[in-house]
Amino acid sequence: MFRKKTYLPPEAPYKEVWSKGDIFAKLSFFVMGLFQLKNKHWLKGLLLLASEVIIIGWLLFSGFKAISMLGTLGTVKTKKLFGMLLREFIILFYLIIPFSTFYLEFLR
């Protein structure tokens, strides 16, 4: 059904991409999806950009607090956390992990 590609483009190391790439290639190291948007891969570029905004938003609003509580695993002994855990699960497994794998594939 799916055929393996017979031609693979040569891989470029990060140093070469940084030194020889255009401004969008360099900015793509910091803002995910810019290079895809420049190359008119609209869906992939917007999804990567949206995932980065969601990750940064989560870090600012609840992520840093959650990370800081890892040392003691929180201060409240028992609490009904189903709603919060469900929200964190949805963010982690349906947004962050798939889009970060797309971004890692782009960097190869």
Image: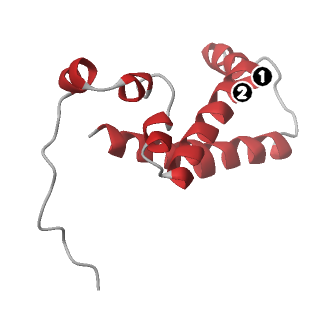
Whether label 1 touches label 2, CB < 8 Å: yes
Report the residue at 32% width, 37% height from top: 107
Q: Is residue 72 left or right of residue 100?
A: right
Question: Residue tagged by mark 2?
Answer: 57
Q: Which mark is residue 51?
A: none
Amino acid residing under circle 1: Phe
User: Which x, y percent locates residue 44?
Assistant: 51, 51
Q: Is residue 83 left or right of residue 55?
A: right
The quadrant in which residue 78 appears is top right
Q: Residues within 10 Å of mark 2 (few under 14, many from 20)?
A: few
What's the coloring here?
A: secondary structure
Q: Residues within 10 Å of mark 1 (few under 14, many from 20)?
A: few
Rendered view: 5 above or below 28:
below
Q: Which mark is residue 61?
A: 1
| SS for dot 1 | helix
* Nearer the observer, 107 or 41: 41
Q: Where the C terminus falls, by quadrant?
A: top left
The quadrant in which residue 6 appears is bottom left
Report the residue at 54% width, 42% height from top: 48
The quadrant in which residue 18 appears is top left
Rendered view: 64 above or below 17:
above
* Nearer the observer, 49 or 75: 49
Marks 1 and 2, how far apart in space?
A: 6 Å
User: Which x, y percent locates residue 96?
Assistant: 57, 42
Q: Where the N terminus falls, by quadrant?
A: bottom left
Q: Is residue 87 left or right of residue 28?
A: right
User: Which x, y percent locates residue 23?
Assistant: 39, 23
Report the residue at 18% width, 68% height from top: 5
Q: Nearer the viewer, mark 1 or mark 2?
A: 2
